[in-house]
Amino acid sequence: MSKLAAQILTKTGIPPTVAFEAKPKTLPELLNVQRKNAYKVKVMPTHWFEKGFDGCYYEIHKAKYKRYLNEPTHGKAWGILFWRGKQMTDKPYKIRGCLKFNWRIYSSPNEQGIYYDPERAMAIERRRTNLLKEYCEKQAE
């Protein structure tokens, strides 16, 4: 182990890789740790997973990164949307919400025991809108 690694471990107590794995990631952060340009990687926003949307994901075809504070945490990505297992577009298009949402590598929610429930999906949306309203009210004060 290098001296720098030993210093980091003694200061934080958590290995950097574990700390990175635990925090929610934007799309550029997630794709940056994948293979070069993350070609053909399947990703989905975490709120799709929480709502139980099965077969809904983006297949990444191109990614460009911007360095922010010496880390490639910003950028753009292009991909093809698959919704309920059907390909929605023929050509890759720019994915919106890369920095806005948290993203994860695609895995079927049904395999992990999460099924689409309209009531649960509406409850999650209500919670998100309430949090957004509270945040806007605090900013207005």
Image (cartoon, rainbow, N blue to C red):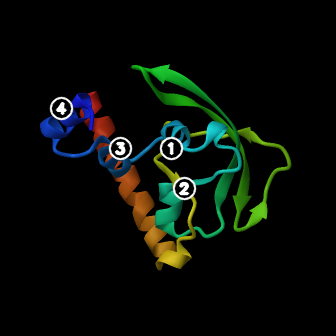
Reading the image, the residue beneath label 3 is: 20
Residue drawn where x is 64% and y is 57% of the image: 57
* Residue at the spot 58% in from the left edge and 67% down from the top edge: 53
Residue at mark 2: 105
Q: Do the residues labelled 1 and 2 touch (CB within 8 Å)?
A: yes
Rounded to the nearest angstrom, the CA distance separating label 1 from label 2 is: 8 Å
Amino acid type of disc 2? Ile
Q: Marks 1/3: CA distance? A: 10 Å
Left or right side of 127 for 76: right
Badge 4 or badge 1: first in the primary sequence: 4
Question: Considering the image in quadrants, where does the N terminus appear?
Answer: top left
Residue in view at x 65 percent, y 37 percent: 37
- State the SS at label 1: helix
Question: Which element is circle 2 on?
Answer: strand
Against 123, residue 10 (above or below) is above
On residue 7, the disc is 4
Mark sitting earlier along the chain (4/3): 4
